[in-house]
Image (cartoon, helix red, strand yellow):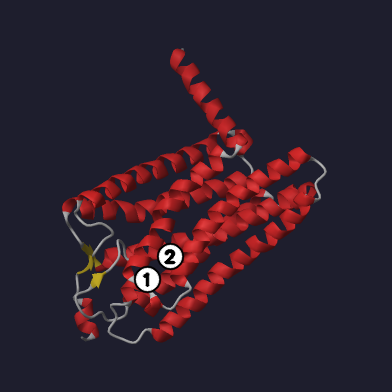
Amino acid sequence: MTSLENHTVAEFLLLGLLQHTPAHFCVFVLISMMFFVTLTGNSLLILLILVDPLLHTPMYFFLWQLSLIDILFTIAIVPKMMSDFLLHKTAISVSGCGTQIFLGLALGGTECILLGLMSYDRYVAICKPLHYLLHMNWPLCRQMALSSWVSGAFNALVHTVYTMKFPFCGPREIHHFYCELPGVLKLSCEDTLAYETGVLISTTILLLIPFSVILASYILILVTIIHMASAEGRKKAFSTCSSHLVVVSLYYGAIIFMYMRPISSHTPGQDKVVSVFYTIVTPMLNPLIYSLRNKDVVGALRKTLWKCSACGKT
């Protein structure tokens, strides 16, 4: 098949996550509930951080950025999957597929970097509290956040453009519930081994640099916590850091399994299950993990609810 024939293709076929069986319909209902919890939980967390002055700190600034990524990530993938299941459709346009690849890579890459920045913030707060405002001032925090978004978007743009230039052969069936780079590359007529090596290298850099920052930060944090004189201080520091570690473990574990293996070793079943973790499960768990274990967020929620109830009575 020639490159010209490839450009005349209007759509791909997404084979999806679910089949039309009673058991899979129950899974669909569960995913719908998780989608609702994701949007509600992350939106509420962003609202609380923006309206409560006590939460106007670098830690919560990065946290609402994370919630925004989770909302956008979920909206980019889950509604399409749900509508395809309900309408018995599998088609997605070439432009729509490219958009999903770009958003998935951009938001995923940004989240990787942001999790590294959040761990550095916790390191400075716990290990160097007297220098916190110096090292984590607002101009620097905004620059760090902007850099994470720009880096994620640039990496995604390069890979999306390169991937969509390949000629595609066969039935153009993507064994996935959304257009993810490994699944799309499998449809290429050309040998993609050299490009797959480039993907592996760029992914390794994008993942391992923030992961190294996270690892180094938490080793230093653990040493500091062990030497803390106050039991209450140790408990508070451990509670804050354990929440972040749970999120990092879930997200990085799934991403590393997906993108740091040769594409030839991928199987549709594995890819779908692993992708569910970082597209559906983790975005839902993030606000729950960070809010239920955080006294400041719980306090802000109670204060906001009390104000709303007081306004309703007047």
Amino acid identity at mark 1: Leu
Q: Is residue 225 above or below residue 144?
A: above
Q: In this orientation, does residue 187 appear?
A: yes
Q: Residue at x 49, y 68 (%)?
A: 256
Asked if marks 2 and 1 touch (Cβ < 8 Å), the reply is: yes
Tag 1 secondary structure: helix
Which element type, helix, strand or loop, lies under badge 2?
helix
x%, y% of residue 9? 19, 74
Picture coordinates of residue 150 (x, y %)? 51, 63
Q: Which mark is residue 3?
A: none
Q: Quadrant of residue 90?
A: bottom left
Q: Earlier in the sequence, mark 2 or mark 1?
A: 2
Q: Could you say which quadrant of the image residue 262 lies in?
A: bottom left
Q: Where is residue 277 drawn, in percent x and y?
A: 42, 57
The residue beneath circle 1 is 181
273 above or below 29? Answer: below
Instruction: Give the Cα separation between the discs numbered 2 and 1.
Output: 8 Å
Relative image position of residue 279 (x, y in whole percent):
40, 56
Q: Is residue 121 left or right of residue 285?
A: right
**In front of the other: 51 or 44:** 44
What residue is drawn where x is 46% and y is 61%? 108
Residue type indicated by callout 2: Leu
**Residue 109 makes an appearance in the image:** no
Residue at the far front: name it. Answer: 23
Residue at image position (25%, 57%) is 18
Can you identify the residue that label 2 sits on? Answer: 105
Left or right: 82, with 106 as reference point: left
Q: Residue furthest top?
A: 314
Quadrant, the N terminus: bottom left
Mark 2 nearby-residue class (10 Å; few <14, some 14–19, many ≥20): many
Q: Which residue is found at the position 83% from the left and 43% from the top?
A: 229
